[in-house]
Amino acid sequence: MLIGTYRHQIDEKCRMRMPAKLKAELGDGFVITKGTNGCLTAFSKTKFDEVYNKLTNLPIFDANIQKPVRMILSSAFETEEDKQGRILVAKELRDYAKIQKNIVFVGAGNRVEIWAEEEWDTYADGDLAQSINSLSGLGV
């Protein structure tokens, strides 16, 4: 299961290590791309294939649909670890997520979200009761 919150740091060469529990679920060569609310999203290869198939089957001549498709797919990359298990995070993605040093990995069910610590703390500081209540209309 992709659950839990893990706080780490990105090193001086802009590399990170996926927490072991999350990496075990994602597998090798997982995919990272831009996510919602200013975070990055990591998918297993299998899950990203599902997302990719859905995105590439959307109407190609609808400009409102194609912009987010382009943003997601153009920023996606399949990870490669160095010998120490570190992954280089592209500058474009670090800038998008405002990642400088401290990062938070959030297990979000079928994906892992990667947040700048300050951004996550601000986002998570909202009204939890109201957020949980909003799920009731979805049958949760």
Image: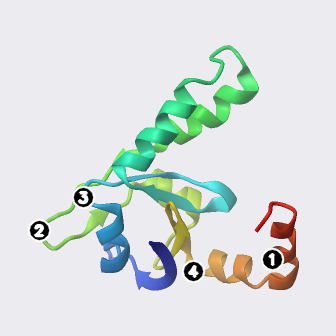
Q: Nearer the viewer, mark 3 or mark 2?
A: 3
Residue at 51 percent of width and 82 percent of height: 4
The residue furthest front is 139
What is the secondary structure assignment of the residue under circle 4?
helix
The residue that mark 1 highlights is: 132
Distance in Å between CA atoms under marks 3 and 2 = 13 Å
Distance in Å between CA atoms under marks 3 and 1 = 33 Å
On the image, the x and y values in percent for residue 125 come to 76, 85
On the image, the x and y values in percent for residue 14 come to 35, 68
The quarter in which the C terminus is drawn is: bottom right
**Front residue of this view, candidates 13 and 53:** 53
Comes first in the chain, label 4 or label 2: 2
**Front residue of this view, candidates 126 and 56:** 56
Q: Amino acid at mark 3?
A: Asp
Comes first in the chain, label 2 or label 1: 2
Query: How busy is the neighbourhood of tag 1: few (under 14 within 10 Å), some, or many (20 plus)?
Result: few
The residue that mark 4 highlights is: 117
- Discs 4, 2 touching: Cβ within 8 Å: no
Q: Nearer the viewer, mark 3 or mark 1?
A: 1
The residue that mark 3 highlights is: 28
Answer whether residue 14 is visible to the viewer in this image: no
